[in-house]
Amino acid sequence: MVMTMMWQCHLSSSECRCYRLNGFSLFKRLPIPLSSGSRTLEQSVGEWLESIGLQQYESKLLLNGFDDVRFLGSNVMEEQDLREIGISDPQHRRKLLQAARSLPKVKALG
C-alpha cells in the first residue's frame, strides 16, 4: 500500500524554502528577522551564502544543522565538518570558514 501525504504551507514563499533530498521534499521555515542588530544576523543562511558567492551549498548546510546565521560566527563550523557534508573544494571551505569567523559571536548565557 502506497500512502501519499500532502502538506499545505500557510507561509509566503519568502518565509520558507523547499529542498529536494533523495526524492523527498523538505520544507524549511526561514528564521524570523531580529528586531535590532546587524543586518548580517537578519539574513537567512541562503542569503548569507549568496552574499559570499557560495549559494550552491545552502541545502548541504541546512540539512546538516547549520541553519541559523546568528550562530555561525561562534566557531561551530570546522573544516572537517564541511568536508564531511560534501564540500570538497578546499577554497570554498576556506572561504566559508573565513566568512563565518567574521560574523559576530553569540554571547554565552550566564
Image (cartoon, helix red, strand yellow):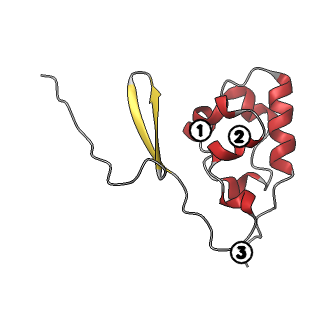
- The first of marks 2 and 1 along the sequence is 2
Residue drawn at x 60%, y 48% is 67
Residue projecting furthest to the bottom? 110
Check disc 2 and give the amino acid type: Leu
Q: CA distance from mark 2 to mark 1?
A: 15 Å
Query: In screen coordinates, is 90 left or right of 46?
Result: right
Label 2 with label 3: CB-CB less than 8 Å: no
Check disc 1 and give the amino acid type: Asn
Q: Secondary structure at mark 2?
A: helix
Query: In screen coordinates, is 19 left or right of 41?
Result: left
Q: Position of residue 31 (x, y in %)?
A: 55, 57
- The first of marks 2 and 3 along the sequence is 2
Residue projecting furthest to the left? 1
Observer-nearest of 57 and 33: 33
Q: Quadrant of residue 63?
A: top right
Query: In screen coordinates, is 7 left or right of 91?
Result: left
Residue identifier under label 2: 49
Q: Position of residue 68 (x, y in %)?
A: 63, 53
Residue identifier under label 3: 109
Q: Residues within 10 Å of mark 3 (few under 14, many from 20)?
A: few
Q: How many marks?
A: 3
Q: Quadrant of residue 33?
A: bottom right
Residue drawn at x 69%, y 27% is 84
